[in-house]
Amino acid sequence: LDTDVLVVGGGPAGASVGHWLASAGHDVTVVEKRPVPRHKACGDALTPRALRELARLDVDPLRLGGHRIEGVRMVHNGRNVIVPWPLHDDLPDHGAVLRRDLLDTELRRRAADAGATILMGHEATAPIVERGFVRGAVLDADPETASAVDAVRSRFVVVADGANSSFGRALGTARHRNWPYGIATRTYFASPRSGEPWIESVLGIPDASGHPIAGYGWVIPMGDGTVNVGVAVLSTYRDVRRVNALKLLHAFSERIAARWTIDPGAPIKAPTRFRIPLGGSVGPKMGPTFLVAGDAAGVANPFNGDGVDAALMTGRLASDVLHEALTVGNSTTLQRYPTLLADEVGQFHKVGRLSARFLGRPMILRPALRLGLRSERVMGAVLRIAANELRDGDRFGGAERTYAVANTIAKFAPNW
């Protein structure tokens, strides 16, 4: 099979590339190794920034049966503060929750409707390289796939196969070892409070020794009778090697059981555990004929681990660059991609990585937690920064002033 662009991975980043390039009239093929839509416990929550990216694709999670979310309830040591999503001229005033299998299926459908070829059950196992240039991939098709394709040749390739990108590693991508990553574990429980409009974020959950971890626990009401419950730990946490993520999830589930009326001993699905590269920590982002997008590029938000909006954004930017390369016929155009990413989120990522490094220290984490829950204003500022919803040109908001100080410090800090 020959195509203009081969996209490895059919998640939000890959499907986004498929949609944009096919809509522009290019021949694009998206390969997804799973033969049927996968359920992925992460990514159910969609921030206003993610909703804006989805709106560009004419996808509304609420029309697909999603659950509207008004904001976040932040909890620490018995105190809680309800923080609505920050008001922003360019973003919706709400978030949403939609199961990832439903979202991914809809995004692939949009790409197919635009003219992209979608090959489910086809894993890209090795790149096709000619004279040092990537020109497609060898495929391993699922035995149940009726129309199996064993290779796709292309002018360009987009690597979008997720956080543990084996195809990306074959092309030389790697995570910066001294940059932070997240360790996340999550599952689902039945709960009569599934219809609540607030995500609950529990800060400073204790480890086995009772010390607060650099991370958080969450409860995401799904609106369908279930809640998504999970914990995340930053790799910068001093005692991260001694944290058993599965035990931490069980302890957290017991801690919130009465409040959410769940049975911590009866999860609906077995817990999933994985590492999430954060803050642009995977590189390089491009080669002469390939680009890297989504979790394969490690672009998840370093403050909260959210990766859907970043995946959609990188897919859109990669498509813009490839459209120009295909139209002008100059592959050096791909060199613009890392610059576009840096302009969009580069400094935000650096501030997030710096913050993660400092919050990994107990002597900084404890007073930060005590200070944080003092007022709705403080937590509103925290949410605005964490969700990357800062207002341009606003010199008077607490979030913007705080971020400006952190940004100045980060400019002089090592490139962590």
Image: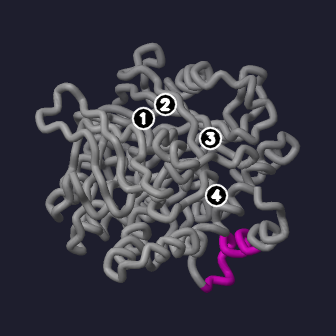
Mark 1 or 2, closer to the camera: 2
Where residue 204 sits in the image (x, y, percent)?
70, 38
- Residue where numbered disc 4 is placed: 379
Name the residue type under label 2: Arg
- The answer to which of marks 4 and 3 sits earlier in the sequence is 3
Where residue 264 sits in the image (x, y, percent)?
47, 18
Q: Could you tell me which secondary element the residue under label 1 belongs to?
A: strand
Report if residue 401 lies within the magenta region: yes
- Residue where numbered disc 2 is placed: 186
- Residue where numbered disc 3 is placed: 182
Residue at the location (43% across, 70% down)? 317
Name the residue type under label 1: Asn
The residue positioned farthest toward the front in the image shown: 131
Q: CA distance from mark 3 to mark 2?
A: 13 Å
Residues marked 4 and 3 touching at CB (< 8 Å): no
Q: CA distance from mark 4 to mark 3?
A: 22 Å
Residue at the location (71% across, 49% down)? 179
Q: Could you tell me which secondary element the residue under label 4 belongs to?
A: helix
